[in-house]
Amino acid sequence: MDTGSHLLFGATLAGLAALQPEVAHSPVLAHAVLTATLLGSHAPDFDSFIRLKSYAAYVRHHRGLTHSLPAVAVWPFALGVPIALLFGVWAQLTTVVLWAMAAVVFHIALDWLNAYGVQCFRPLSRRWHHLDVLALFEPPLFALHGAGLLLWAFGAVRPGPVFLAVYALTFVYIAIRGWQHACIVSKVKRSLGQDGVCHIVPSLWLFHWQFYEAEYCFYNGTVRNGRVEVRDVFAKERNHPAIQATLGTDGVRAFLHFAQRVHVKLTERHDGYVVQWRDMRFWYNHKLPFGVDVKLDRELNVVSDTLGWTKKAWDPPYV
């Protein structure tokens, strides 16, 4: 999910920790736990610094090793040990480490529920896993946790019971979104009469979704209030020497490492070719905003390649 949501959930996890008597009755330990959950809720995204190297490196590595199975064990101790020493709560190291682990696990779980995906089962599997249940930013969850945090900050409530209710409602909300996702997948397959792979991308709004269904071609459209509407149909990728010539570029290699449903468009120009690789998961309103554009001359030499999004950060899709 987005950075703001991860940090908010880190703060509310610290409120949930107040259910432990030793945390509730020790301000020093409570501050240590708050520091651990705030850092733990963001730690898996420390790999974002690799973007300084190149965007291709970012696409290849983001949500990879830092979100993996070993990371679940490494991050809590890497954070918990210095925090326990800094706050002088070494005797409560286990408490600090376990709450840091809760923050790390919750971060990875939320990313898994998103449509972008995460390599959360490395080193057992290098596949990208995504459950497509939540959008990058979920207004109901943000409002729920934000309201609880404000009440706690102004001293209006005891944090433990309040955040127990907040997290119970959070898991109920996620379960509803998961049930809704399964229902919409069935509805889309029945509507199209196809047995291929159906991928649903949630939007910010509870009953608005976009989809594609891939077998012999890609169907893109929307599901709003239970109504399926096909907006675009794309043929599967074609084989052409110009397309093959782009496979060695760093941008295309990074893209294919991450992308799962690939559409290729070849455009011939007077001075050469433009090959556009696109990930069909991120279709929105007749556009395919994520991919790589490769320009070639008439001899199929690569002139340039550009990897990334062709949309504003605040525009859909929210992944």
Image (cartoon, grey):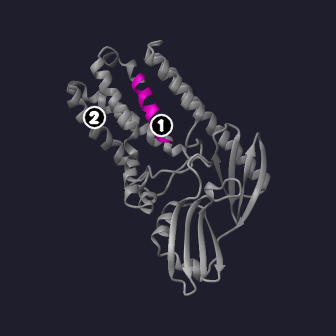
The reply, left or right, for residue 80 in relation to residue 181 is left
Q: Nearer the viewer, residue 278 or 98?
A: 278
Which residue type carries mark 1? Answer: Gly
State which mark lies toward you, 1 or 2.
1
Please give left or right for residue 42 compared with residue 225 in the image.
left
Circle 2: element type? helix
> Residue at point 64% right, 59% down?
288
Asked if 150 appears above or below 254 in the picture, the reply is above
Q: Is 12 one of the magenta-colored residues? A: yes
Above/below status of 154 relative to 196? above
Q: How many marks?
A: 2
Residue 134 position (above or below residue 279):
above
The image quadrant that residue 92 belongs to is: top left
Q: Of residues 274 and 172, which is closer to you in this image?
A: 274
Provide the residue designation for mark 1. Answer: 4
- Give, as a single range, the part of the protein colored magenta: 1-15
Q: Is residue 230 visible?
A: yes
Name the residue: 65% across, 43% down.
Answer: 181
Amino acid type of disc 2? Gly
Mark 2 burial class by Cα count in 10 Å: few <14, some 14-19, many 20+: many
Quarter of the rendering containing residue 174: top right
Query: Residue 149 placed where, x, y %?
Result: 47, 23
**Label 1–label 2 contact, CB within 8 A:** no
> Along the polypeptide, which appears first: circle 1 or circle 2?
1
